[in-house]
Amino acid sequence: MGADAASAISRARAAADLSRWNDVVRFGREALSLDPNLVQGHALVALAGINTRDSALALAEAERGIACAPEEEWCYRLRAIALLQLERGEDALTAIAEAVRIAPDEALVWVAQSKILVRLKRLPEALAAAERALELSPHDDAALAQMANVYLDMKNWVEAEEFYRLALALDP
């Protein structure tokens, strides 16, 4: 990656940290104009698409990222989330299964899988995926919040409240 592309990626990441999604797209596209095979650029633009609910953009960029680096789980995870936003739950589950295969020790892939399974009303499987995320990263606020979300869908209010409290203690 050239210095100009690296600089654009750095600006896109900083914009993402500030939830400035239009800037993420602008800087991500700038980086991609300099290096069209830059997986980070595709992933950041896909992330912006997800956060702005431009699911078609997110899906297209995630797929471009996968084409550039099929060994990277991040773009499969982004693809799965975009598919879920497009109400294509079974396709999302297939995409996240590939992310899990690539990075079975990454808590965030299990959190994403759990979210998809919740949307598909497959709550016991969603709980198992959330538990796996928590095993991998016991102090991860996203994993704790997902445990709470699953318990909420299961109408287990006591457990949901406890996991929400734990998540909020880490990230108020």
Image: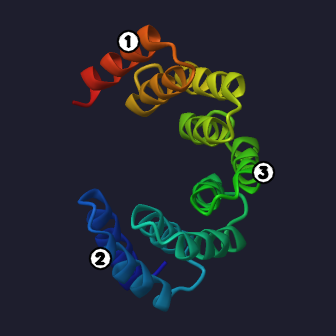
- Element marked by disc 3: helix
Of mark 3 and mark 1, the one earlier in the sequence is 3
User: The residue under label 3 is which amino acid type?
Assistant: Thr
Q: CA distance from mark 2 to mark 1?
A: 37 Å
Give the position of the C terminus as an image quadrant: top left
Of mark 2 and mark 1, the one earlier in the sequence is 2
Q: Which residue is mark 2?
A: 23
Select label 3 or label 1 by which is in front. Answer: 1
* Residue 90 place in picture, x, y as percent: 76, 51
* Residue 72 place in picture, x, y as percent: 65, 57
Q: Which residue is mark 1?
A: 162
Figure check: 14 above or below 162: below
Q: CA distance from mark 3 to mark 2?
A: 31 Å
For this rendering, which residue is in front, 48 or 103? 48
Residue at (27, 67) in percent of width and height:
15
Select label 3 or label 2 by which is in front. Answer: 3
User: What number is the disc on residue 12?
Assistant: none
Left or right of 25, for residue 74? right
Figure check: 67 above or below 155: below
Q: Which residue is mark 3?
A: 94
- Element marked by disc 1: helix
Quadrant housing residue 7:
bottom left
* Residue 27 place in picture, x, y as percent: 35, 80
Figure check: 107 above or below 69: above
Figure check: 31 above or below 161: below
Residue at (29, 72) in percent of width and height:
11
Quadrant housing residue 114:
top right
* Residue 29 place in picture, x, y as percent: 43, 84
Select label 2 or label 1 by which is in front. Answer: 1
